[in-house]
Image: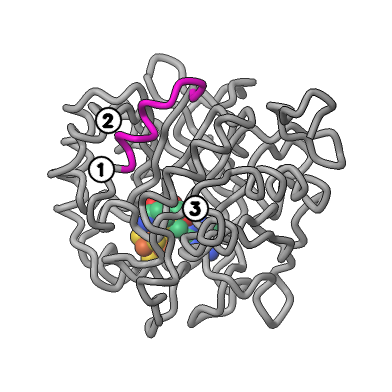
Amino acid sequence: MQDNGTYPNTLIDGFGRKVDYIRLSITDRCDFRCVYCMSEDMTFLPRNEVLSLEECARLVKIFVSLGVSKVRITGGEPLVRKNALWLFKEIGQLSGLRELVTTTNGSQLEQQAEALKTAGVRRINISLDSLDAERFRKITRVGDLDKVLRGIAAAKLAGFHNIKLNSVLMKGVNDDEALPLLAFAVDQGIDISFIEEMPLGDVDHTRDSTYVSNEATLKLLQTRYELISSAETTGGPARYWRIPNTNTKVGFISPHSHNFCESCNRVRITCKGELYLCLGQEDKVDLMPLLREFPDDDRPLIEAIIGSMRIKPKGHDFDLKRAAPAVIRFMSHTGG
Ligand code: SAM
Ligand code: SF4
């Protein structure tokens, strides 16, 4: 607390990095079971261990009052949570918020894209790892490619400021689709980011057996496209390239080959209310007990959030060769 009894409205960590971006996972559940994200047999949290949507709204409001200007709603699959739209609307109305964005697998967009846009969602990331229906089903274990393509069409129609595809390439699984996926993005006039697989959670394969570096992907794309390095940023970890005469930006999120920690501006809140200071480390503060013990007093939460800045680690520590996952938490738990 400051001398005048108020709180500073900025969150600055011990390395001088300003935190102005939160990623909030509103559910660990999902209608897909992507092989790099989940094991075949997942146990999900009981309902009472998950933040209510009202608790989510309260937390976001507090973070925005502390200077956070960008909020990403993620999961699990955020759009399978009942009444998720209510939360989007609540957050969309917060003054002080510059950007409300979401990451989705696209399966519910055909029904929800327009309402999300009306609620104030500016940009939307849609995961797409294959354009081949059978392979798409194999990667997601259950997903229907056509439904996702219809979701992408609905998002385009709704008129989001920006639509970006997220593709995780895996060696021997879909790494031959980098060019077709980029061609699809160019054809649709939308952006695409390639994400290196991260060792989060114990899945059914070893991560180094499927690792594809973004450097190799970039080289492959350059055989067909002219890519011009760009200094643009969307406030996230991606590095971007432009393709002349198209509307498409190509991003690379490379936790292994390019460590993005030095400019990290974000923290993550799990659907259990755990505030993780780094995707790849265990440092966290539990906000759920404070939310429930002090339903009418935000001060303990504010103090815990400001205090957490002291334990934000310098960076992650991903190592593909390690037998055990770097972090036991699945991405669907922490929120991608
Ligand atoms: N269900 C939504 C979706 O798939 O877009 C949102 C949550 S998902 C966890 C967010 C992003 O994380 C997706 O783009 C997904 O491809 C990515 N992801 C999940 N597990 C990953 C992993 N182990 N390594 C890299 N990216 C991963
Ligand atoms: Fe679900 Fe997204 Fe994880 Fe796939 S990546 S299993 S869609 S949470």
Name the amino acid, label 3.
Answer: Pro
Residue segment shown in magenta: 87-97
Which numbered dot is residue 85?
A: 1
State yes or no: Cβ of the residue under disc 1 lies below 8 Å from any atom of ligand 1.
no
Residue 113, relative to residue 45: is it above or below? above
- At 69% from the left edge and 71% from the top edge, which residue is drawn? 326
- At 46% from the left edge and 67% from the top edge, which residue is drawn? 37
Cα distance between the residues tagged 2 and 1: 8 Å
**Circles 3 and 1: CB atoms closer than 8 Å:** no
**Circles 2 and 1: CB atoms closer than 8 Å:** yes
State yes or no: Cβ of the residue under disc 2 lies below 8 Å from any atom of ligand 1.
no
**Is 110 situated left or right of 257 in this image?**
left
**Is 131 situated left or right of 39 in this image?**
left
Q: Quadrant of ligand 2?
A: bottom left
Residue lying farthest to the bottom in this orientation? 41
Front of the two marks 3 and 2: 3
**Is 112 situated left or right of 321 in this image?**
left
Residue that badge 3 annotates: 295
Report the quarter where the N terminus lies: top right
**Is 103 situated left or right of 63 in this image?**
left
Which mark is first along the chain, 1 or 2?
Answer: 1
Q: Residue 78, position in %: x, y?
A: 34, 53
Cα distance between the residues tagged 3 and 1: 23 Å
- At 36% from the left edge and 26% from the top edge, which residue is drawn? 93
Q: Residue 38, position in %: x, y?
A: 44, 73
Q: Looking at the rendering, which quadrant does residue 207 occupy?
A: bottom right
**Tag 1 secondary structure:** helix
Cα distance between the residues tagged 3 and 2: 26 Å
- At 72% from the left edge and 34% from the top edge, which residue is drawn? 11
